[in-house]
Image: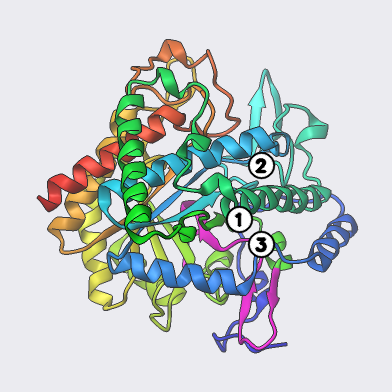
């Protein structure tokens, strides 16, 4: 086996630390059997893809790329379907088209899919009508139905998660590398309900401009632009269920170190980002680029410790900091955090997650997010980075290509009354296709305002 690049680290060394947000499996033998099965299965991604993404993220940190990371709050096995996966790719393609055109830069597309099956929870249990059961922690652990059987952690679900991830990734690759992603045929990405959107006219004006430009270039050069037929999609998920992550972490021939070959970009979440705990211990030793969620409870000194721990060699592209501070807190928190990272002298990629810090509940107890708060945090992030001499190199959204009604506001002015019409998420509210596209246009407008 190749040697880990971090000499005082080993793949199972996280087991010596306290591991938060982990389920308790009732059958240890069944757990070991499932983990053994997963560890024997082929990798889902390759080390070459991982290294390519690391290079792209390094360029994003320098302003030569822009990262668009988006997808489901929590994937479900039931939505491992061609129509759902394709709709998700369509809205990401539409958003990346708007961003490419508006920012005049290449977009790095990273999906929250093919592995986003585990979710941290604020409580280990949930009580309804006097009955208390384990909380739903994502399909990789238990089921959302409120019953003792569904909520019992089942290690066999890890095998199903691997299978669903593989099926998802197979379709994503087939679509992304084929004619579906051809810039000369953006009509392939049209969603059936897009024509009724207030944004449709603005979006199709961009499509027409790009088609005219490509036609002109091919006429002048008398060559077909083959390089625009396919795009690359990378995968990401929160590295939360550590036994599963360990089972998919491998050494590879002719390379030092251990790669998580279950995803390209694993991240450490807000609830598990303590420097002395198991998730940071696991993440600090793998060769993948790593994301770190930075919440409102993060202190400058703790962030400095995490930056040095997760990227001890100051490797370009290694560390992506994902701020999720909330529209009300970002102006107070982000400047000091940026300055603290600058003081380390290390190169990191900053991106904004304006979703998670802006979750609230209606009077009826329904989780939602206001579009104006999401946009407000994102615009403040751009302003603050510019003021601090820093660079915001990407965005991170929970979104879907479906016509759901989970977030309030946006071009169509969704209200609380609309939430019951098409609310499908089992965990957190997502931007729908129209709100996602509107967000892309908003990024372009703000960027152009800042750059003159």
- The verdict on residue 417 being magenta is no
Q: Provide the residue span drawn in magenta.
A: 249-275
Sequence-first tag of 1 and 3: 1
Residue 124's place in the image compared with 339, above or below, is: above
Q: Nearer the viewer, mark 1 or mark 3?
A: 3
Q: Which residue is mark 2?
A: 138
- In the picture, the quarter occupied by the N terminus is bottom right
Residue 65 is marked as: none
Q: Which residue is mark 1?
A: 240
Q: Which residue is mark 3?
A: 262
Along the viewing direction, whichever of 36 and 437 lies nearer the viewer:
437
Residue 207's place in the image compared with 109, above or below, is: above
How many residues crowd around disc 2 within 10 Å: few (fewer than 14), some, or many (20 or more)?
Answer: many
Q: Position of residue 145 (x, y in %)?
A: 73, 28
Q: Position of residue 95 (x, y in %)?
A: 40, 41
Q: Quadrant of residue 348?
A: bottom left
Q: Position of residue 84 (x, y in %)?
A: 62, 34
Seen at 25% across and 46% down, the residue is: 330
């Amino acid at each position: 086996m190749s040697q880990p690049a971090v000499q005082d680290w080993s793949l199972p060394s996280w087991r010596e630390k306290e591991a938060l947000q982990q389920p308790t499996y009732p059958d240890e033998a069944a757990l070991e059997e499932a983990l053994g099965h997963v560890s024997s299965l082929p990798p889902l991604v390759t080390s070459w893809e991982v290294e390519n993404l690391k290079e792209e993220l390094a360029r994003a940190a320098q302003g030569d790329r822009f990262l668009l990371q988006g997808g489901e709050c929590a994937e479900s096995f039931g939505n491992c379907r061609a129509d759902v996966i394709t709709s998700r790719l369509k809205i990401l393609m539409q958003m990346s088209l708007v961003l490419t055109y508006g920012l005049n830069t290449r977009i790095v597309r990273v999906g929250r899919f093919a592995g986003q099956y585990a979710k941290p929870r604020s409580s280990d249990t949930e009580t309804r009508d006097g009955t208390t059961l384990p909380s739903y922690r994502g399909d990789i652990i238990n089921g959302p139905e409120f019953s003792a059987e569904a909520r019992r952690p089942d290690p066999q679900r890890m095998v199903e998660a691997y299978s669903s991830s593989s099926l998802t990734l197979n379709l994503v690759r087939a679509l992304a590398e084929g004619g579906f992603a051809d810039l000369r045929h953006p009509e392939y990405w049209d969603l059936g309900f897009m024509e009724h959107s207030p944004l449709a006219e603005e979006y199709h004006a961009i499509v027409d401009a790009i088609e005219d430009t490509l036609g002109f270039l091919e006429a002048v050069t008398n060559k077909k632009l083959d390089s625009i037929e396919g795009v690359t999609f990378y995968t990401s998920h929160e590295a939360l269920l550590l036994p599963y992550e360990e089972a998919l972490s491998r050494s590879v021939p002719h390379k030092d170190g251990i790669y998580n070959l279950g995803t390209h970009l694993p991240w450490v979440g807000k609830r598990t980002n303590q420097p002395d705990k198991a998730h940071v211990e696991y993440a600090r030793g793998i060769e993948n680029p790593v994301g770190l969620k930075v919440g409102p409870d993060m202190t400058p000194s703790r962030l400095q410790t995490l930056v040095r721990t997760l990227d001890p060699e100051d490797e370009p592209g290694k560390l992506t900091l994902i701020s999720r501070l909330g529209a009300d807190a970002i102006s107070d928190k982000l400047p000091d955090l940026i300055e603290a990272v600058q003081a380390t002298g290390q190169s990191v990629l900053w991106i904004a997650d304006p979703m998670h810090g802006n979750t609230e509940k209606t009077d009826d107890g329904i989780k939602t997010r206001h579009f104006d708060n999401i946009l407000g945090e994102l615009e403040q992030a751009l302003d603050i980075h510019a003021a601090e001499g820093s660079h915001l190199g990407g965005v991170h959204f929970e979104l879907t290509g479906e016509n759901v009604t989970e977030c309030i506001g946006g071009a169509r002015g969704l209200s609380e009354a609309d939430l019951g019409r098409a609310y499908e998420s089992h965990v957190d509210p997502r931007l729908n296709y129209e709100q996602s596209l509107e967000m892309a246009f908003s990024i372009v407008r703000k960027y152009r305002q800042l750059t003159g």
